């Protein structure tokens, strides 16, 4: 070693090793033209002159150095810059370069301070002399040390803290580092004497990223920039390198969305600056955990086969080496770093990735992380293991409901769709340890798919409403489970699998329209659920919710409305969790259908709206095939004579068959009633006669089909045929009784009609869509008897009940006899505005007509026409009454059992006699002449 003079070679142009000082170590880097000065960080650094210590800490490429250089270049006082590299090791080398940085910054220290002569040590008096000299300065000097993380000697950190503490107001120290320095930072933080900018602060916001990319010549939408910021976590180098790569692309947004980070300049940067700097064991750990979204030290150990992950991960986190703290003992890799490591792993160790996924799946299975277990089991290609984990955890219901349902269905979408008799590998249960030698019974079955695989295949097919394939897989699973139940080694696992079987049986029964099968399955499920631990059931509320929904839907198909309502309300009154949102939606839609069938359209509509809110609240995707909700809304719209809206709702339904008999039946009802309202009686009849395949009969579906067919026959002028259609089914539904009564009255049998109406349930059990129609039939019967008092009383009641619900259709169906009653006081007051148009008082209308008559050429046609020269026929009056009720030409034709052309002929004749050319003028003129 060279000799060291008492005070060292102060002012010498060489370091303790005799090498010249390199100028680049003492000059801040130049800012590129694409550098973006960020106001929020500049303002934070503005506090630095008021605190002795400033820390800018972040990962490689985070923009630390450029930020500090830009800030330092705009300071008023003297600034010394030092960039540490691998050659500056040991206290002597560090302090010689520190003193040279002061000289380069225009703050030379006097010779009395001295300088180190040896690389590995420094005289203990040198820091004291330096601190004393700095403390005596009138103006503080700012010293920026870049890449301070390369200084690993604790002695240097202690000496630097000594100089900082005793240098007082004469020194402002800025450390730019990847890791937290070995300084007593807690003392500075407590005293409020530190300014800190951390890795999270250095991350670019979306707005900053948009501006940065524009500096690189890229103009991206906020959404595209946001996606890039999410992928890079706002990492400055990543954003710049991506921008440079995208500039040559014809479509930068598509390029940035699809580019492979593992084969790019980003990969070169991270591999060189982060991975290759690590020791071999750390590199191996990073490559292996790249297959994981998140990981604990114990999981990392399972992948490496070692027991050193905890200190390695803590060190990587401390060093800002693109390892992030995910909370509660979990870590994760920076997304881009993870992409790059996975690509590197595949090229370096082909085939290892699947092995790592398999190890991860098994570790996660025992830790209770089901969904990560499934993802890694699937990534390992071990679908049998994944299926076993799903079934053993009682989570098969999550294929149908919950925030992960869509992802799970996609995970198992490519599960080999083998027919049940095709031999495949038999999977062990994920919960089960390695067994003793197999029994002969099990050995005979080991080449077949496991029951769990068949159950998942059955669930997949039933979710697509493929009943035949779903039942085939379900039957095969049941056969194997029955055989397994005889083996004591399997008995402990059978309860969850049998409960899953029962759930799928209940769904199959519902899809087949069999309430008996669904009831049997529900009882079997209840028995198996009692054998399972309560905590496991609490983790899966969707299972019971789905069972009750299937049971309620099957009971509804069978016409067991009270029992169906009880099961469905049990679902809707449950806790509002995301896991049960889809069953709650289905339950509400079926309750809405029950309300509609009992004549409560307003209540039905509210339940369908609430059902939609259930899934929208959690942003959940709907299962394949819509339920009964939308057809119920269409049927309600027909009741209100909102025909275009009803048609729009039905047109938005898919062309595929309805997923189950209940939905098919309500679609048929809504479609047939829309066609009837449009006057398309033959099409309505054909729709009502459509067959709905089901294992068991549905009284209400059959009854409403006959009701719609009867209405079509009645509209065609065949009241006897209409009445005969309803003879066998009229008693099944309240609406059927009213329809039969209406047909009997049209056939001239008033007494029979009234007897039928007397059979209706009490008013609390049926709603206005039924009671209003019943009142109108009774009113028509009273009119035929000449009892006008009863007519007015019944119409008054019908209008009061129909008004709040907006029920126009029952009045339009009743026939033309209603017109004179609804347009005359006092009933007009109840009908105006929603059933018939509002009109000015007649005296006022007459005065308006007289005034218009003298208004010259601008007066409306017909206002000065005087009395009719030719009287209107009775049929023309019938047509005018329907015009006044806002009916279309097609609706008038349907109501009067005429063709559309005949109605148009009557309208032309009426217009000619009234001396008008438009329908509104015709109605107004007829009212003025007391013809309406």
Image: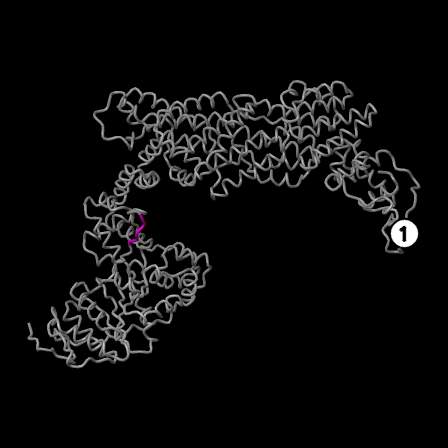
Extreme front residue here? 191
User: Image point 24% across, 31% down: which residue?
Assistant: 433
Colour style of the rendered protein structure: one colour
Q: In which quarter of the image is the C terminus?
A: top right
User: Image point 65% across, 20% down: which residue?
Assistant: 731
Tell me if residue 800 comes above or below residue 203 in the rendering: above
Helix, strand or loop at mark 1: helix
Number of callouts: 1
Q: Which of 844 and 612 is in front in this view?
A: 844
Q: Where residue 645 appears, x then y in whole percent?
A: 64, 41
In the visual, does 541 lie left or right of 561?
Answer: left
Whether 324 is among the magenta residues is yes
In the visual, does 116 lie left or right of 442?
Answer: left
Near mark 1 (Cα within 10 A), the count class, few <14, some 14-19 or many ≥20, is some
**Quadrant of the image occupied by residue 167:** bottom left
Q: Where residue 741 appears, x then y in whole percent?
A: 72, 22
Q: What range is drawn magenta here?
A: 323-327
**Quadrant of the image occupied by residue 366:** top left
Whether 84 is among the magenta residues is no
List the residue tagged with mark 1.
853
User: Image point 41% across, 22% down: which residue?
Assistant: 524
In the visual, does 110 lie left or right of 886?
Answer: left
Tell me if residue 316 comes above or below residue 794 in the rendering: below
* Most common secondary structure along the magenta stretch: strand
Q: Where residue 921 appears, x then y in whole percent?
A: 82, 46
Q: Quadrant of the N terminus?
A: bottom left
Q: Nearer the viewer, residue 838 or 861?
A: 838
Q: Where residue 480 appears, x then y in whole percent?
A: 34, 23
Q: Which of 694 and 286 is in front in this view?
A: 286
């Amino acid at each position: 070693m060279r000799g060291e003079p008492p005070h060292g070679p102060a002012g010498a142009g060489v370091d303790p090793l005799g090498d010249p000082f390199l100028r680049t170590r003492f000059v801040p880097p130049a800012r590129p033209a694409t550098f973006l000065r960020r106001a929020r960080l500049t303002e934070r650094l503005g506090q630095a002159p008021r605190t002795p210590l400033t820390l800018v800490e972040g990962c490689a490429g985070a923009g630390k150095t450029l930020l500090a250089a830009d800030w330092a270049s705009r300071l008023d006082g003297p600034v010394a810059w030092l960039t540490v590299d691998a050659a500056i090791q040991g206290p002597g080398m560090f302090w010689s370069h520190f003193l040279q940085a002061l000289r380069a910054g225009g703050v030379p220290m006097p010779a009395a301070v001295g300088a180190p002569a040896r690389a590995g040590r420094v005289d203990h008096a040198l820091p004291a002399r330096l601190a004393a000299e700095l403390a005596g300065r009138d103006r503080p000097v700012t010293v920026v040390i870049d890449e301070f993380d390369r200084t690993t000697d604790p002695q240097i950190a202690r000496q630097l803290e000594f100089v900082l503490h005793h240098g007082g107001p004469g020194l402002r120290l800025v450390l730019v580092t990847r890791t937290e320095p070995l300084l007593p930072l807690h003392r500075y933080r407590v005293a409020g004497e530190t300014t800190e900018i951390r890795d999270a602060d250095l991350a670019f916001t979306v707005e900053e990223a948009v501006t940065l990319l524009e500096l690189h010549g890229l103009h991206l939408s906020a959404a595209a920039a946001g996606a890039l910021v999410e992928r890079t976590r706002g990492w400055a180098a990543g954003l710049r390198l991506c921008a440079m790569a995208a500039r040559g692309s014809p479509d930068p947004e598509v390029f940035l969305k699809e580019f492979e980070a593992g084969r790019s300049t980003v990969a070169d940067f991270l591999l060189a600056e982060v991975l290759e700097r690590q020791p071999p064991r750390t590199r191996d750990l990073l490559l292996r955990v790249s297959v994981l979204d998140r990981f604990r030290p114990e999981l990392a150990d399972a992948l490496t086969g070692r027991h050193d992950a905890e200190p390695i991960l803590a060190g990587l986190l401390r060093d800002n080496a693109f390892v992030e703290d995910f909370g509660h003992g979990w870590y994760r890799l920076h997304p881009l770093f993870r992409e790059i490591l996975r690509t590197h792993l595949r090229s370096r160790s082909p085939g290892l990735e699947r092995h790592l996924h398999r190890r991860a799946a098994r570790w996660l299975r025992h830790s209770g992380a089901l969904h990560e277990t499934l993802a890694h089991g699937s990534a390992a290609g071990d679908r049998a293991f994944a299926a076993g984990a799903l079934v053993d955890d009682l989570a098969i219901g999550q294929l149908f409901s919950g925030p992960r349902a869509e992802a799970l269905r996609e995970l198992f979408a490519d599960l080999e769709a083998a027919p049940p008799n095709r031999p495949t590998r038999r999977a062990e249960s994920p919960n089960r340890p390695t067994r003793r030698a197999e029994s002969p019974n099990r050995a005979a079955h080991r080449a077949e798919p496991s029951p769990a695989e068949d159950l998942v295949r059955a669930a997949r097919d039933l979710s697509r409403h493929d009943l035949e394939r779903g039942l085939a897989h379900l039957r095969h699973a049941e056969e194997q489970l029955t055989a397994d139940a005889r083996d004591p080694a399997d008995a402990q696992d059978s309860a969850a699998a049998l409960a899953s079987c029962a759930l799928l049986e209940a769904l199959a029964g519902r899809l087949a329209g069999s309430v008996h099968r669904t009831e049997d399955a529900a009882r079997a499920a209840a028995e198996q659920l009692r054998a399972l631990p309560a905590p496991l059931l609490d983790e899966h509320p969707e299972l019971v919710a789905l069972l009750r929904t299937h049971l309620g839907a099957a009971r509804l198909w069978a016409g067991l409305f009270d029992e169906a309502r009880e099961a469905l309300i049990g679902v809707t009154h449950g806790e509002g969790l995301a896991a049960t949102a889809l069953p709650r939606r289905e339950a509400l839609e079926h309750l809405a259908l029950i309300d509609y069938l009992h004549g409560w359209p307003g209540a039905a509509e509210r339940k369908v709206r609430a059902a939609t809110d259930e899934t929208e609240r959690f942003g959940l995707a709907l299962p394949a095939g819509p339920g009964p909700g939308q057809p119920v809304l269409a049927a309600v719209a027909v009741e209100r004579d909102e025909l275009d809206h009803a048609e729009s709702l039905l047109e938005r339904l898919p062309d595929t068959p309805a997923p189950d008999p209940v939905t098919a039946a309500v679609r048929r009802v809504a479609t047939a009633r829309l066609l009837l309202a449009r006057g398309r009686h033959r099409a309505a009849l054909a729709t009502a006669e459509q067959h709905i395949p089901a294992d068991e009969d549905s009284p209400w579906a059959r009854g409403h089909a006959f009701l719609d067919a009867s209405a079509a026959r009645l509209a065609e002028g065949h009241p006897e045929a209409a009445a005969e259609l309803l003879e066998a089914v009229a008693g099944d539904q309240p609406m059927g009784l009213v329809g039969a009564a209406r047909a009997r009255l049209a056939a001239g049998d008033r007494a029979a009609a009234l007897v039928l109406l007397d059979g209706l349930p009490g008013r609390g059990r049926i709603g206005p869509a039924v009671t209003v129609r019943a009142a109108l039939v009774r009113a028509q019967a009273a009119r035929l008897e000449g009892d006008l008092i009863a007519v007015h009383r019944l119409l008054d009641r019908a209008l009061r009940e129909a008004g709040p619900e907006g029920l126009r259709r029952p009045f339009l169906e009743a026939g033309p006899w209603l017109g004179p009653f609804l347009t005359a006081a006092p009933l007009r007051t109840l009908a105006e505005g929603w059933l018939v148009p509002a009109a000015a008082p007649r005296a006022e209308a007459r005065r308006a007509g007289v005034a218009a008559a003298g208004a010259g050429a601008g007066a409306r046609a017909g206002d000065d026409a005087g009395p009719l020269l030719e009287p209107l026929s009775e049929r023309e009056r019938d047509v005018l009454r329907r015009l006044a009720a806002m009916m279309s030409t097609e609706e008038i034709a349907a109501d009067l059992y005429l063709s559309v052309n005949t109605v148009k002929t009557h309208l032309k004749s009426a217009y000619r006699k009234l001396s008008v050319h438009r329908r509104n003028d015709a109605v107004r003129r007829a009212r003025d002449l007391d013809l309406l």
